[in-house]
Each structure stands twice: as C-alpha cells, then as structure tokens.
Amino acid sequence: MSLRTRFAPSPTGLLHVGNAWSALQCQAWAEQQHAELILRIEDIDHTRCRAEFAAAMIEDLHWLGLRWQGEAIYQSRRRQAYRQALHQLRAMDVIYPCFCTRKQIRGEIARMASAPHAEDAVMAYPGTCRSLTPGDQQQRMQQQPFAWRLDTAKAMRTAGERLTWRESSGQMHRVRVDDDIVIGRKDIGVSYHLAVVVDDAAQSITHIIRGRDLAASTAIHRLLQQMLGLPEPVYIHHPLLLDAKGKRLAKRNHATTLSSLRRMGVQASRLREFLACDPPPCWPFDQAGEGVPEETILRMLGKR
Ligand code: GLU
C-alpha cells in the first residue's frame, strides 16, 4: 500500500511560522517514507475562511519549498460527500437535530451547575434535544434552524467499547468521547470533524501528521471513522512551535507570518534551517507578530 499524508491548513488568515513548522514536518516524513504529500485547503467555514487567504497560503507554501502531489484540494467543493456521510449517520440513527442556541445551552449548564452534586456535572452539551420525539423533531425541523449532534453514548455502544486509536510511536489510546459533539453545524451544514474523516478516507490518507493541539479531536475522528466504515489511519501528533513565553503560535495572537518574513527579505532556506530541529526551537519572539522589529528578525534569520 502506498503511504500518503496531507497538510491541511484552514484559510482563516495568513500562514505563520507555526504552520510552516507543521508543513515541514509533513514534508520531512513524506521524504523519509517515500510517501506522497497532498495539500488540502480546509475552507468549509465560509464565515471565517477567505479565498484570498487560500491563494496567499499556496504562494507562501511554494516560497517555503513545500512540494505536494497534484493540485490543492478544496473542502468547499466537496459538500456533497459530507452530506452523504450525514445521511449515512442519520440512517443509523446515531445523530439527532439540535435546536438549542448557545445562550440556551449556557443557561442549561448554569442551572445544572447550581444544582446539588454540581461537581459531577460535565461542561458538555446537556442533551436537551436528544430525547425529542420523531414527531417533534420533524415539526421543528420545518420551522427552526438546527445542528446535527452525535448521540455519543449510542455511537460508542455501536462502535464497541474496545475502539482505540494509534500514535505512530506505538501508543494505543482508548477512544473516549463524552460530549454529544456537533457534526453538522447550523450555519455551514457540516463540521471540521466530519469533513476531515470523510476527506482523509476519500483521499487515501494513511498517516495523519498534525500538531498536538489536535490530538484531543482524534478520539472523535476514530469514532466517526468506525461509524462510517472508513479505514483507520496512523496518527503522528507533533510538538508545537512555541513562542518565547511558552505559548502556542496562533493566528489570533498575531504570530509572525511567512509573508511578513518574505517581505523583509528573509530567505526560505534560512527559515527552513532554523525550523529544522526536532523538538522544535522556540520562536524567539513573543506574539508581537508584525510588531517585531525587522532588524531583530533579520539578525536572527540573516539574509542568506
Ligand atoms: N485545518 C486544521 C487546522 O488548520 C487541521 C486539520 C487536521 O490536520 O486534521 O488547524
């Protein structure tokens, strides 16, 4: 079987050095294993993703020296496949429509938290819509916007208690999911979790290489794979590139972008050299992003 991995950024902003580190991890693994690397643009969330960011990402990745197989694949063009997966789960009766607003869910959780034994209450969806009758569901579906939630307890029973996921280092993890997570969002009709498992299978991904911050989602992905009859990939959750204060670099914290480095005249080869450590080096600036003085960056990364 040929080995295949993917780099799967979401175009909600420009790529930063943390994304570059992750992309280079995928590439290094693919080279070592003589595996294929594909690029998947995870742009299902039209409320946050922008075509300009996707185009800029591709340009930045070319600049960085990432080489992928074929054309980039866009999730926004694969909605039909996600709808089919939702139909499949519906036919199995393991998802239910949820009409709650965030405010109602917060209110319900607060009520539970002020009840006796509040310490036992989990801060998860309280299950309000789980037990609506089919008649109620039908009627409300005609009138109100709704999300699809996984009936997790039922899904876990169907999938079997012994379900695990495997990290390439050999560790096996028991799949535990306690929340009725949303798998079809009210606004976009799908969710990251559903799209990612459908695509990984359709695109024959054998190894998933991504940051440790996503390890918490892997149990959900295994559960969905099992329900949908999809193959099990191997997971490699790599450590994250942190800033000088030990924080994960993130778009929302204005981490230094690749395009700003490029504008300063930093050479991609120099950035690759700097990032070529495992475990990763720390990005020696805090999250000042574009505010980091150019001379400081150029002193560190040179112009070679
Ligand atoms: N699109 C996700 C992100 O940018 C990555 C998804 C994944 O690798 O599973 O964080």
Image: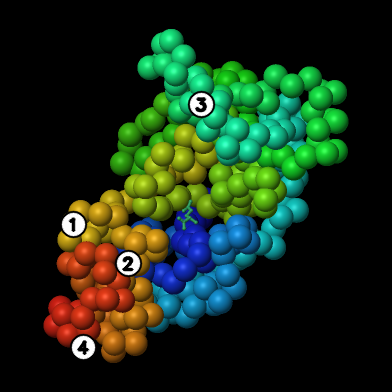
Q: Residues within 10 Å of mark 1 (few under 14, many from 20)?
A: few
Where is mark 4, residue-wise? 304
Instruction: Please tell me which residue is depicted at 75% across the width and 53% down the height of the picture.
Output: 80
Tell which circle, 3 or 2, labels the residue nearer the N-terminal end.
Answer: 3
Point out residue 294 in the picture as x, y percentages from the top left corner: 22, 84
Tell which circle, 4 or 2, labels the residue nearer the N-terminal end.
Answer: 2
Q: Which mark lies nearer to you, 3 or 1?
A: 3
Q: Is residue 217 left or right of residue 79?
A: left
Where is mark 3, residue-wise? 109
Mark 3 residue type: Ile
Tell which circle, 1 or 4, labels the residue nearer the N-terminal end.
Answer: 1
Q: Which mark lies nearer to you, 3 or 2?
A: 3
Point out residue 139 in the picture as x, y percentages from the top left corner: 85, 30
Residue 70 visible at all: no
Task: Name the disc covering residue 245, or none.
Answer: 1
Q: CA distance from mark 3 to mark 2?
A: 34 Å
